[in-house]
């Protein structure tokens, strides 16, 4: 199959589909737990837990990851209906994959995962590195290979994008 042909759509099993949690969902869960617990001391402990900044950050991060995952799923679904060349954006897909996977990729594995031709992928990877959205590090055991990961700047940019916040002027 060539790089620009539409892919086959696959549905993910129900147990692997993403669930989006919003702050409102957390608040509702806390209120429900208060009703179930009924004990003021335990209710106060739940309030304290809710005020933990790390918990709120984790819930927010999960929400951003779910939005990014939905974006990637929407792109793949769109490709089952429309010809792939209409919407081919390998750089965006590479950024999404690096953001979602939170692991390092080799150039070949990122090209394959984004379904881009190797030469196209390499051009876009060089651009993403130049924009400081992706970092390139030497492979620890193979001098011929490098690892690619999303940079902190890239992560912050995608966090901003998926949170719907307007960037500072």
Image (tube, helix red, strand yellow):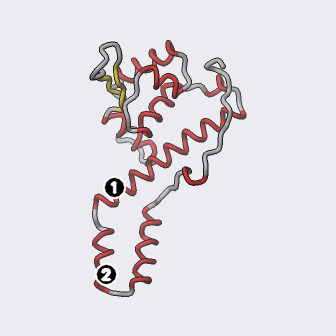
Residue at left 54%, top 21%? 116
Q: Residue 8 falls in which quadrant of the image?
A: top right
Residue 161 in the image: above or below residue 125: below
Q: Secondary structure at mark 1?
A: helix
Residue 5 in the image: above or below residue 167: above
Q: Secondary structure at mark 2?
A: helix
Looking at the image, which is closer to me, 15 or 28? 15
Residue at left 30%, top 69%? 49
Q: Position of residue 72 (x, y in %)?
A: 55, 38
Residues marked 2 and 1 touching at CB (< 8 Å): no
Looking at the image, which is closer to me, 151 or 3? 3
Quadrant of the snapshot with the N terminus? top right
Of badges 2 and 1, the one in the foreground is 2
- Left or right: 163 in relation to 81: left
The residue that disc 2 covers is 42
Q: Residue 73 falls in which quadrant of the image?
A: top right
Q: What is the crowding at mark 1: few (fewer than 14 residues within 10 Å), some, or many (at least 20)?
A: few
The residue that disc 1 covers is 57
Looking at the image, which is closer to me, 58 or 11? 11
Residue 41 in the image: above or below residue 138: below
Give me the C-alpha separation between circle 2 and circle 1. 23 Å
Q: Earlier in the sequence, mark 2 or mark 1?
A: 2
């Amino acid at each position: 199959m060539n790089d620009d042909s539409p892919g086959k759509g696959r549905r993910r099993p129900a147990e692997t589909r993403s669930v989006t949690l919003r702050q409102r969902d957390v608040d509702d869960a806390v209120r429900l737990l208060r009703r179930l617990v009924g004990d003021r001391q335990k209710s106060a402990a739940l309030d304290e837990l809710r005020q933990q900044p790390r918990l709120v950050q984790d819930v927010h991060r999960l929400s951003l990851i779910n939005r990014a995952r939905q974006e990637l799923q929407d792109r793949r679904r769109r490709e089952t209906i429309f010809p792939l060349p209409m919407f081919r954006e390998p750089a965006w897909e590479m950024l999404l994959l690096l953001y979602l996977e939170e692991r390092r990729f080799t150039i070949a594995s990122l090209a394959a995962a984004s379904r881009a031709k190797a030469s196209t992928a390499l051009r876009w990877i060089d651009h993403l590195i130049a924009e400081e959205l992706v970092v390139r590090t030497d492979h620890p055991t193979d001098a011929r290979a490098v690892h690619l990961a999303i940079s902190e700047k890239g992560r912050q940019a995608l966090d901003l994008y998926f949170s719907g916040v307007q960037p500072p002027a």
